[in-house]
């Protein structure tokens, strides 16, 4: 059966105490909303509708940046979850199939859990969980396997508050039924809101069936405060580390490695302690990431070795067996097979041909204060230590630059380029110089008294 996804993301998130809409706060380098979209994508919905309200433009932009096919519904006033779904339903005119409603601030529901909800036979299916502390969650009224209703904490009696089975917020029903039930909601309750949760009792009143599918409470973790956000980050990182290790990657100290939502690492790669992955990193198999590296928007090929203390920024592409050592920063640069950049170097907006050696302290001077320029270095070249490559500039295949050179003009293939002041040697002059300096120091001390 075709499915459609509605993701509610109109709320302000007052308790975050933030100017940023809540669903745009990040976990694993991606907005909470994107996590919700990713978990929803697991059921391969035909349509995805995100309901925006607070910070609508920014939320819509983030949703579209992740999936340009997403549809946006606007809820100008936040009058409850039922009202929010009502804003999305016109986008599903003519759609027949299952509709599943997710919250944008509940990032970790597993696709398998949503699949189980889709597969459940009842007319209305609700995702429930048993948290350690049921707090202010809505309570699920269940008898002999059937769900009779959901009561919000504010509206619940003492007996109902004692129920431990809680509402995650995720609800599924066929589109036609959802339209009819949501159309019949009212706001006569403690909050004066249109509760989506009331569709359960309404369905039962029509003689329809409702049931609960349950999941572990780490999946339904909702983010309401910055402390929740930190807890969500912990949950995300723990999950991602497990996944990465299950894929055959060695993490020497897993609890010190931080991944992004989209980090991909190949088998037999070894990642040392204190490595941080920003978004957009792919690492092939049998690579080695030594401690204290920061990687973002880059690709590391098979057999490459990076770090310790290396920083790879967006557009860094390391081919097989490249070696990038300590205190090296690489941005928007392609390093072909076997290139070695051992120490203390910045390569930006550059291409380095295979097997070239970049000496310690080399810098591509890629920015003139207004524009960026490229540096091209050929294959089997040797860039002497402390070379400044003033871009735009090209160093040919097999060429060599002398240590300390400032290279401002292209160097042809197989040439040697030396761009530094010529050394002057003055025999026997050093003792005289020191005598002169000591005399000057004594004179100044005497003067200071
Ligand atoms: C909701 C459930 C509650 C459940 C809890 C789980 C209802 C009535 N209650 O309560 O049973 O235990 O979630 O976390 O559904 N939103 C909109 N527009 C609105 C109102 C809300 O888009 O007008 C969005 C929010 O941005 C948020 C989600 O819906 O992503 C949930 O809203 P929230 O106000 O947090 O609901 P709860 O009171 O937590
Ligand atoms: Ca909430």
Image (cartoon, rainbow, N blue to C red):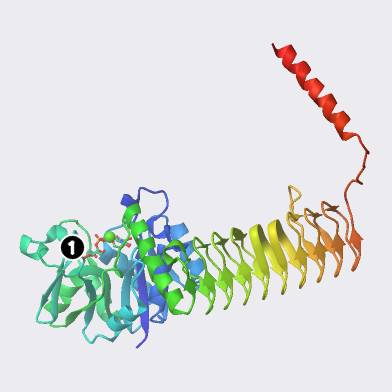
Give the camera-side residue of 116 and 441: 441
Mark 1 crowdedness (10 Å alpha carbons): few <14, some 14-19, many ≥20 = some
Q: Quadrant of ligand 1?
A: bottom left
Identity of the residue drawn at 42% across and 57% down: 25
On screen, residue 184 versus residue 101, left or right, reads left
Label 1 SS: loop
Compared with residue 252, is residue 20 higher up or lower down, i.e. above or below?
above
- Residue 89 position within the rendered picture, expressed as x and y whole percent measured from the top left: 33, 72
Place residue 298 in its image quadrant. Answer: bottom right
Give the camera-side residue of 199 and 220: 220
The residue to which callout 1 is attached is 134
Identity of the residue drawn at 61% across and 59% down: 311
Asked if one can make out residue 93 in the rendered structure from this viewpoint, the answer is no
Q: How many marks?
A: 1
- Residue 5 position within the rendered picture, expressed as x and y whole percent measured from the top left: 36, 75
- Residue 265 position within the rendered picture, expressed as x and y whole percent measured from the top left: 52, 74
Place residue 378 in its image quadrant. Answer: bottom right
On screen, residue 272 versus residue 218, left or right, reads right
């Amino acid at each position: 059966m075709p499915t459609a996804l509605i993701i509610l993301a109109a709320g302000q998130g007052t308790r975050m105490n933030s100017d940023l809409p809540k669903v745009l706060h990040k976990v694993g380098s991606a907005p909470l909303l994107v996590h919700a979209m990713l978990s929803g994508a697991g059921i391969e919905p035909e349509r995805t509708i995100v309901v925006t309200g607070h910070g609508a433009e920014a939320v819509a932009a983030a949703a579209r940046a992740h999936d340009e096919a997403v549809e946006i519904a606007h809820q100008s006033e936040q009058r409850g979850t039922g009202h929010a779904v009502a804003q999305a339903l016109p986008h599903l005119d003519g759609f027949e199939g299952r509709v599943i409603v997710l919250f944008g601030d509940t990032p970790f529901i597993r696709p398998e859990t949503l699949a189980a909800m889709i597969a459940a036979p009842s007319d209305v299916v609700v995702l429930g969980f048993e948290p350690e502390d049921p707090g202010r969650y809505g309570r699920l009224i269940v008898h002999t396997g059937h769900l009779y209703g959901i009561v919000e904490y504010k509206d619940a009696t003492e007996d109902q508050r004692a129920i431990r089975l809680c509402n995650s917020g995720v609800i599924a029903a066929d589109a036609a039924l959802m339209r009819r039930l949501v159309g019949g909601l009212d706001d006569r309750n403690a909050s004066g809101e249109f509760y989506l949760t009331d569709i359960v009792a309404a369905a039962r009143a029509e003689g329809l069936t409702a049931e609960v599918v349950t999941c572990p409470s780490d999946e339904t973790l909702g983010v309401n405060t910055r402390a929740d956000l930190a807890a969500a980050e912990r949950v995300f990182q723990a999950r991602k580390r497990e996944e990465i290790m299950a894929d055959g990657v060695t993490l020497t100290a897993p609890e010190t490695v931080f991944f992004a939502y989209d980090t991909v690492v190949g088998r037999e790669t070894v990642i040392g302690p204190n490595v941080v992955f920003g978004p957009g990193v792919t690492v092939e198999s049998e690579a080695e990431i030594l401690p204290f590296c920061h990687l973002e928007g880059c690709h590391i090929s098979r057999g490459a070795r990076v770090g310790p203390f290396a920083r790879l920024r967006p557009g860094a592409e390391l081919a097989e067996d490249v070696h990038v050592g300590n205190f090296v920063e690489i941005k928007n640069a392609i390093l072909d097979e076997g290139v070695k950049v051992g120490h203390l170097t910045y390569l930006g907006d550059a291409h380095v041909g295979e097997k070239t050696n970049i000496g310690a302290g080399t810098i591509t001077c890629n920015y003139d204060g207004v524009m960026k320029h490229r540096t091209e270095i050929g294959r089997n070249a040797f860039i002497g230590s402390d070379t400044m490559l003033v871009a735009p500039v090209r160093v040919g295949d097999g060429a060599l630059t002398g240590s300390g050179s400032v290279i401002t003009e292209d160097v042809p293939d197989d040439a040697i380029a030396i761009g530094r002041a010529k050394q002057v040697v003055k025999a026997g002059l050093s003792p005289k110089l020191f005598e002169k300096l000591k005399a000057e120091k004594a004179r100044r001390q005497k003067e200071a008294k």
